């Protein structure tokens, strides 16, 4: 069972989040203050931390740094502030994502799942049809040459690489593509991004071998493997 470290000083939010995450099969440990969070951090191992930025005895920015240093796990900020400076500060401190309150439960669960999958693959290099993707460095190469993908194109590629044996419906892809830059993706623009990604990674975009279309269902990854 994956263990979630919830640092949130609003007890009603914490209670509802705990029920939500436990219903999704996660274990949850809750700390309402910076002091209690630091104590728990030294006592228990976690797989991901959800950190409220505004806490009663401080803010979550220093906690993010401490959590990353102590356990090297994904950190997702929970914040009532969607201003650019707060977002940039959090991401520069090493946060993996942020969620603005009030948030949709389905969105949060999708972001947690994506962060956990990305972290679990961090030590592997994916290889498929001459394409190499190294999640630990964020570098993607084709035939030995580095490719330059947009943030959303890269995230889309990681979704496929993280689900190598799954058929991904368009709805599932939309759930996963919560872009940190705030770029909105709908069903129509998803088609555009898949087309752009194929143009960069496929030998022949008109006959793709990496991102395959499953007619009437969605898409799936072609045959790939992860190499250490």
Image: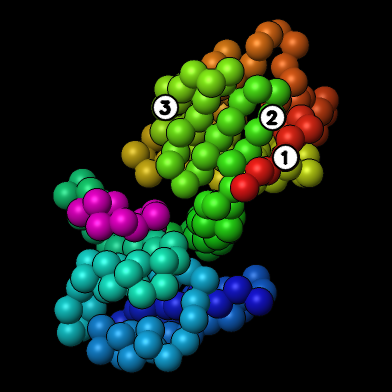
Q: Nearer the viewer, mark 3 or mark 2?
A: 2
Figure quadrant of residue 117: bottom right
Q: Which color mode does the image show?
A: rainbow
Q: Mark 1 sits on what residue?
A: 225
Distance Cα–Cα, label 2 vs label 1: 7 Å
Residue in front for this viewpoint, 60 or 23 = 60
Q: Tell me if 142 is positioned left or right of 216 in this view.
A: left
Do callouts 2 and 1 mark residues in contact (Cβ within 8 Å)? yes
Q: Tell me if 43 is positioned left or right of 162 in this view.
A: left
Mark 3 or mark 2: which comes first in sequence? 2
Q: Mark 3 sits on what residue?
A: 150
- Residue at point 40%, 62% (across, down): 76
Q: At which x and y percent is residue 81? A: 24, 58
Residues shaded magenta: 89-99
Mark 1 or mark 3: which comes first in sequence? 3
- Residue at point 78%, 44% (across, down): 165
Is residue 83 visible in the rendered structure shown here? Answer: no
| Label 1 CA crowd tier, 10 Å (few <14, some 14–19, many 20+) | few
Q: At which x and y percent is residue 14? A: 43, 81
Q: Is residue 13 above or below residue 142?
A: below
Is residue 98 visible in the rendered structure shown here? Answer: yes
Distance Cα–Cα, label 3 vs label 2: 20 Å
Q: Mark 2 sits on what residue?
A: 128
């Amino acid at each position: 069972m994956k263990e979630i470290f919830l640092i949130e000083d609003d007890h009603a939010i914490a209670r509802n989040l705990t029920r939500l995450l436990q219903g999704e099969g996660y274990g949850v440990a809750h700390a309402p203050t910076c002091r209690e969070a630091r104590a728990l951090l030294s006592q228990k191992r976690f797989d991901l931390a959800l950190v409220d930025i505004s806490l009663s005895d401080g803010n979550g920015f220093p906690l993010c740094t401490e959590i990353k240093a102590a356990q090297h796990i994904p950190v997702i900020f929970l914040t009532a502030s969607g201003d650019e400076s707060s977002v940039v500060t959090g991401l520069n401190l090493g946060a993996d994502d942020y969620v603005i309150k009030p948030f949709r439960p389905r969105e949060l669960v999708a972001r947690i799942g994506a962060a956990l999958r990305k972290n679990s693959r961090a030590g592997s290099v994916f290889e498929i049809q001459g394409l190499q993707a190294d999640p630990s460095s964020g570098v993607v190469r084709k035939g030995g040459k580095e490719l330059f993908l947009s943030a959303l194109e890269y995230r889309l590629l990681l979704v496929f690489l993280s689900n190598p044996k799954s058929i991904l419906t368009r709805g599932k892809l939309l759930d996963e593509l919560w872009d940190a830059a705030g770029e909105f993706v709908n069903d129509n623009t998803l088609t555009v991004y898949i087309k752009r990604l194929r143009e960069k990674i496929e030998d022949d975009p008109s006959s793709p071998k990496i991102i395959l279309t499953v007619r009437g269902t969605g898409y799936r990854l072609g045959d790939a493997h992860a190499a250490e």
